[in-house]
Amino acid sequence: MQNDAAIIARVEEILDAHQGMEGPLLPILHAIQEAFGHVPQASLPLIAQNLNLSRAEVHGVMSFYHDFREAPAGRHVLKLCRAEACQSMGADRVADHARKALGIEWHETTKDGAVTLEPVFCLGLCACAPAAMVDGRVVGRVDEARLDSLLEEVR
Ligand code: FES
Protein backbone atom coordinates (compact mmCIF):
# COMPACT_ATOMS: atom_id res chain seq x y z
CA MET A 1 0.00 0.00 0.00
CA GLN A 2 1.42 3.34 -0.95
CA ASN A 3 1.45 6.08 1.64
CA ASP A 4 -0.26 9.39 1.12
CA ALA A 5 2.99 11.26 0.41
CA ALA A 6 3.84 8.92 -2.46
CA ILE A 7 0.29 9.18 -3.77
CA ILE A 8 0.35 12.96 -3.60
CA ALA A 9 3.68 13.18 -5.44
CA ARG A 10 2.45 10.96 -8.27
CA VAL A 11 -0.92 12.71 -8.50
CA GLU A 12 0.85 16.06 -8.76
CA GLU A 13 2.89 14.74 -11.68
CA ILE A 14 -0.29 13.60 -13.38
CA LEU A 15 -1.99 16.94 -12.78
CA ASP A 16 1.04 18.75 -14.22
CA ALA A 17 0.93 16.55 -17.30
CA HIS A 18 -2.68 17.61 -17.93
CA GLN A 19 -2.21 21.34 -17.47
CA GLY A 20 -4.03 23.38 -20.10
CA MET A 21 -6.08 20.47 -21.39
CA GLU A 22 -9.74 21.16 -22.05
CA GLY A 23 -12.15 19.05 -20.00
CA PRO A 24 -9.31 17.32 -18.17
CA LEU A 25 -11.19 15.65 -15.30
CA LEU A 26 -11.89 12.29 -16.96
CA PRO A 27 -8.40 11.95 -18.48
CA ILE A 28 -6.91 12.79 -15.08
CA LEU A 29 -9.07 10.21 -13.29
CA HIS A 30 -8.10 7.63 -15.94
CA ALA A 31 -4.41 8.40 -15.52
CA ILE A 32 -4.66 8.17 -11.73
CA GLN A 33 -6.49 4.87 -11.91
CA GLU A 34 -3.88 3.59 -14.35
CA ALA A 35 -1.13 4.58 -11.92
CA PHE A 36 -2.65 3.11 -8.74
CA GLY A 37 -5.24 0.61 -9.92
CA HIS A 38 -7.89 2.78 -8.26
CA VAL A 39 -8.50 6.44 -7.51
CA PRO A 40 -7.20 7.00 -3.98
CA GLN A 41 -9.23 9.24 -1.67
CA ALA A 42 -6.14 11.34 -1.06
CA SER A 43 -6.09 12.41 -4.69
CA LEU A 44 -9.57 13.96 -4.72
CA PRO A 45 -8.80 17.22 -2.87
CA LEU A 46 -5.72 17.73 -5.05
CA ILE A 47 -7.71 17.30 -8.23
CA ALA A 48 -10.44 19.62 -6.96
CA GLN A 49 -7.94 22.31 -6.06
CA ASN A 50 -6.03 21.99 -9.30
CA LEU A 51 -9.15 22.21 -11.48
CA ASN A 52 -10.90 24.75 -9.31
CA LEU A 53 -13.80 22.38 -8.62
CA SER A 54 -15.40 21.37 -5.35
CA ARG A 55 -14.50 18.00 -3.86
CA ALA A 56 -18.15 17.01 -4.19
CA GLU A 57 -18.03 17.66 -7.94
CA VAL A 58 -14.94 15.49 -8.34
CA HIS A 59 -16.41 12.77 -6.16
CA GLY A 60 -19.71 12.96 -8.05
CA VAL A 61 -17.99 12.44 -11.41
CA MET A 62 -15.83 9.67 -10.04
CA SER A 63 -18.75 7.73 -8.58
CA PHE A 64 -20.99 8.29 -11.64
CA TYR A 65 -18.60 6.43 -13.96
CA HIS A 66 -18.45 2.77 -13.00
CA ASP A 67 -15.00 2.29 -14.46
CA PHE A 68 -13.40 4.26 -11.65
CA ARG A 69 -12.65 2.29 -8.50
CA GLU A 70 -12.46 3.67 -5.01
CA ALA A 71 -10.55 0.64 -3.74
CA PRO A 72 -7.98 -1.63 -5.38
CA ALA A 73 -9.30 -4.66 -7.27
CA GLY A 74 -7.96 -8.18 -6.93
CA ARG A 75 -5.02 -9.30 -9.05
CA HIS A 76 -7.43 -10.18 -11.86
CA VAL A 77 -10.73 -8.63 -12.86
CA LEU A 78 -13.40 -10.83 -14.39
CA LYS A 79 -16.25 -8.93 -16.00
CA LEU A 80 -19.30 -10.83 -17.16
CA CYS A 81 -21.72 -9.27 -19.60
CA ARG A 82 -25.21 -8.89 -18.15
CA ALA A 83 -26.88 -7.24 -21.13
CA GLU A 84 -29.63 -8.57 -23.41
CA ALA A 85 -27.86 -10.58 -26.12
CA CYS A 86 -25.72 -12.36 -23.57
CA GLN A 87 -28.74 -13.00 -21.37
CA SER A 88 -30.49 -14.65 -24.28
CA MET A 89 -27.54 -17.03 -24.59
CA GLY A 90 -27.33 -18.11 -20.96
CA ALA A 91 -25.38 -15.35 -19.25
CA ASP A 92 -27.44 -15.78 -16.08
CA ARG A 93 -26.36 -19.39 -15.77
CA VAL A 94 -22.74 -18.47 -16.33
CA ALA A 95 -23.00 -15.67 -13.78
CA ASP A 96 -24.52 -17.99 -11.17
CA HIS A 97 -21.75 -20.45 -11.86
CA ALA A 98 -19.08 -17.75 -11.49
CA ARG A 99 -20.47 -16.48 -8.21
CA LYS A 100 -20.61 -20.00 -6.83
CA ALA A 101 -17.15 -20.99 -8.10
CA LEU A 102 -15.57 -17.85 -6.68
CA GLY A 103 -17.69 -17.71 -3.53
CA ILE A 104 -18.35 -14.00 -4.01
CA GLU A 105 -21.02 -11.62 -5.20
CA TRP A 106 -20.79 -8.87 -7.82
CA HIS A 107 -18.19 -6.19 -7.05
CA GLU A 108 -16.49 -8.45 -4.53
CA THR A 109 -12.98 -9.90 -4.50
CA THR A 110 -12.09 -13.46 -3.52
CA LYS A 111 -10.48 -13.88 -0.10
CA ASP A 112 -7.13 -14.78 -1.66
CA GLY A 113 -7.18 -11.48 -3.55
CA ALA A 114 -7.04 -13.29 -6.90
CA VAL A 115 -10.26 -12.28 -8.64
CA THR A 116 -12.69 -9.38 -8.57
CA LEU A 117 -16.05 -10.10 -10.20
CA GLU A 118 -17.89 -7.30 -11.96
CA PRO A 119 -20.93 -6.99 -14.20
CA VAL A 120 -20.58 -5.13 -17.48
CA PHE A 121 -23.35 -4.03 -19.80
CA CYS A 122 -22.36 -5.08 -23.33
CA LEU A 123 -18.82 -5.58 -24.56
CA GLY A 124 -19.73 -5.24 -28.22
CA LEU A 125 -19.33 -8.99 -28.58
CA CYS A 126 -23.06 -9.70 -28.78
CA ALA A 127 -22.74 -12.18 -31.67
CA CYS A 128 -20.40 -14.31 -29.57
CA ALA A 129 -22.54 -14.23 -26.44
CA PRO A 130 -22.19 -14.84 -23.56
CA ALA A 131 -19.21 -12.51 -23.37
CA ALA A 132 -16.65 -11.88 -20.66
CA MET A 133 -13.58 -9.78 -20.15
CA VAL A 134 -10.59 -10.96 -18.19
CA ASP A 135 -8.06 -8.26 -17.33
CA GLY A 136 -9.10 -6.29 -20.38
CA ARG A 137 -9.12 -9.28 -22.79
CA VAL A 138 -12.52 -10.08 -24.28
CA VAL A 139 -13.67 -13.68 -24.50
CA GLY A 140 -16.76 -14.95 -26.32
CA ARG A 141 -19.01 -17.96 -25.97
CA VAL A 142 -18.34 -18.33 -22.29
CA ASP A 143 -20.25 -21.29 -20.93
CA GLU A 144 -19.65 -22.84 -17.53
CA ALA A 145 -16.73 -25.01 -18.73
CA ARG A 146 -15.04 -22.09 -20.48
CA LEU A 147 -15.47 -20.02 -17.37
CA ASP A 148 -13.83 -22.71 -15.27
CA SER A 149 -10.80 -22.78 -17.54
CA LEU A 150 -10.58 -18.97 -17.51
CA LEU A 151 -10.61 -19.06 -13.74
CA GLU A 152 -7.96 -21.77 -13.68
CA GLU A 153 -5.73 -19.55 -15.82
CA VAL A 154 -5.87 -16.68 -13.37
CA ARG A 155 -5.84 -18.46 -10.01
S1 FES B 1 -24.89 -8.05 -24.85
FE1 FES B 1 -23.16 -9.06 -24.10
S2 FES B 1 -21.62 -8.37 -25.45
FE2 FES B 1 -23.35 -7.27 -26.10
Image (cartoon, grey):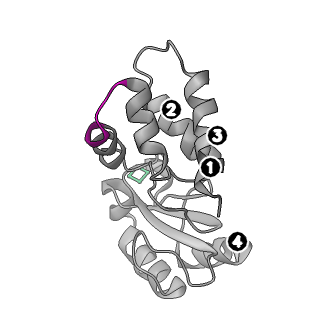
Q: Which label's residue is closer to the chain start, 4 or 2?
A: 2
Which residue is outermost to the front? 5
Quarter of the view holding residue 106: bottom left
Q: Are marks 4 and 2 in contact (CB under 8 Å)?
A: no
**Category of crowding for the residue at label 1, using alpha-carbon neighbours closer than 10 angstroms: few (below 14), some (14–19), many (at least 20):** few
Residue located 40% across and 78% down the image:
105
**Nearer the camera: disc 3 or disc 1:** 1
Ligand 1 under 8 Å from disc 4 Cβ = no
**Disc on res. 154:** 4
In this rendering, the answer to whether 115 lies above or below 97 is: above
Quick one: SS at disc 2? helix
Ligand 1 under 8 Å from disc 3 Cβ = no
Quick one: SS at disc 1? helix
User: Is residue 124 visible in the rendered structure shown here?
Assistant: no
Label 1, on which residue?
5
Magenta-colored stretch includes residue 56: yes
In this rendering, the answer to whether 63 lies above or below 20 is: below
Label 2, on which residue?
28
Distance (Cα) linking label 3 and label 4:
29 Å
Magenta-colored stretch includes residue 113: no
Q: Which label's residue is closer to the chain start, 2 or 3?
A: 3
